[in-house]
Amino acid sequence: MKVYWIALYKKIDSQENIKKYGAKVTDIIKSYGGIPLVRGGKFNTLEGETYPRTVIWEFPSYEKAMECHDSKEYQEGWAIAKDTTERNLQIVEAFNIE
């Protein structure tokens, strides 16, 4: 079952750090089967809190998404931005109606 890695960025204090993070981790995430679906872009908050950036990756399985997140390579990449970035990150299984 497909899984989605959803990052809602609450605060980004360094655009430089977030760009370096993105450049470093994109190929790492793809190597675990991640497919980028949403990465910033135009948005309109209709209800609830406003987040200045939303990123969504699709993964082939929950295990692959967790393996990617927990990998040494990804964690080294996240270290670039984590001290200047506040986000909510969830890994969520897709809904299957079949």
Image (cartoon, helix red, strand yellow):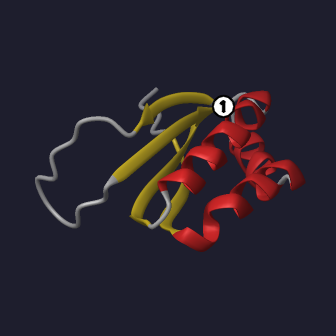
Q: From where the camera sits, is residue 56 visible?
A: yes
Residue 34: x and y in percent read 66, 31
Residue 65: x and y in percent read 70, 44
Residue 30: x and y in percent read 71, 29
* Secondary structure beneath label 1: loop
Nearer to the camera, 50 or 63 = 50
Q: How many marks?
A: 1
Mark 1 sits on what residue? Answer: 34
Residue at (45, 67) in percent of width and height: 13
Residue 94 lies, with reference to residue 66, above or below; the image says above
Q: Residues within 10 Å of mark 1 (few under 14, many from 20)?
A: many
Residue 45 lies, with reference to residue 83, above or below; the image says above
Q: Quadrant of residue 60?
A: top right
In the figure, is residue 84 to the left or right of 68? left
Nearer to the camera, 62 or 81 = 81
At label 1, the amino acid type is: Gly
In the figure, is residue 58 to the left or right of 97? right
Residue at (62, 61) in percent of width and height: 81
